[in-house]
Image (spheres, helix red, strand yellow):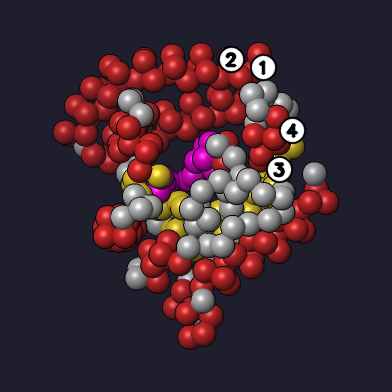
Amino acid sequence: MIRFLVIVIFLVTFLILSIPVFFMEWVIGKFNRKTRDNSSLRIVQWGFKSILKVTGVETVVIGQENIPDEAVLYIANHRSFFDILLTYSRCPRLTGYIAKKEMENIPLLSTWMKYLYCLFLDRENIKEGLKTILQAIEYVKQGISICIFPEGTRNKGEELSMLPFKDGAFKIATKTNCAIIPISMNNTAEIFENHFPKVKKTRVIIEYGKPIYPNDLDKETKKHIGDYVQNIIQTTINKNVELL
């Protein structure tokens, strides 16, 4: 419970102190957008790493060398709020996450998200959802990576289960031929969700799969690319249970 309170205090303090930082970042962006983007990325990554340090989580990372030095589409399974912190704190380059529309209403946090090219997906509005995917495609063309949890929400089922992947997410890759990087995560719900509201020390496994370029796949596999990537992630999380 103490860790939970420390994280809440840190997060609130971080967001309040961000107010003057937003102004400075805005000024920097007027002169050099790339410098602002990089500084915003590192500031948020520092905040996320600080929170993870408070949790005491032990993270085993496999295959991070598989991430190419180019804009990619990260595809990950999703069981915890901490999945975002665990993955974003390791992004080597500017990356926008696709988040649910409700996140846009959170003061200050949504400002950081917009600075970092995050997109807000309205899951109830197909037309707006398509606009979000099209914007993500444009970001990838501009050299900005995108991360999405294609289950559409946190999976609250059994540890090794996954919800069906939504195919729309993969258009970001099929329309740009950017690399898809599968991210497989084990045991992340044990940090918080499995014993809410306590935050507990635990061991998690994160594995980055080898890049998948849609145009290198045969026609049938590309047609069912969501199932193909989900099978890779499922196989990996099954394998990595023995590392916990």
Q: Secondary structure at mark 4?
A: loop
- How far is mark 2 from mark 1, CA to CA? 6 Å
Q: Height in image: 91 above or below 217?
A: above
Indicate the amino acid at tag 3.
Asn
Which residue was labeled with disc 3?
A: 187
40 and 11: which one is in front? 11
When asked about the image quadrant of residue 108, the answer is top left
Tell me the crowding category of disc 2: few under 14, some 14 to 19, or many 20 or more residues within 10 angstroms, Cα based: few
Query: Which residue occupies 73% across, 28% down?
Result: 201
Please indicate whether residue 42 sits to the left or right of residue 194 in the image: left
Please indicate whether residue 78 sits to the left or right of residue 30 in the image: right
- Position of the N terminus, as image quadrant, is top right
Query: Which residue occupies 43% across, 30% down?
Result: 44
When asked about the image quadrant of residue 26, the answer is top left
Q: Is residue 113 visible?
A: no
- Mark 4 vs mark 1, foreground winner is 1
Which residue was labeled with disc 4?
A: 202
Query: Which residue occupies 17% across, 34% down?
Result: 31
150 and 60: which one is in front? 150
**Residue furthest toward the front?**
124
Which residue was labeled with disc 1?
A: 1
Query: Which residue occupies 57% across, 67% down?
Result: 229
Indicate the amino acid at tag 1.
Met
Indicate the amino acid at tag 4.
Thr
Residue 95 is one of the magenta-drawn residues:
yes
- Position of the C terminus, as image quadrant, is top right
120 and 239: which one is in front? 120
Q: Secondary structure at mark 2?
A: helix
Any mark on residue 5, and which?
Answer: 2
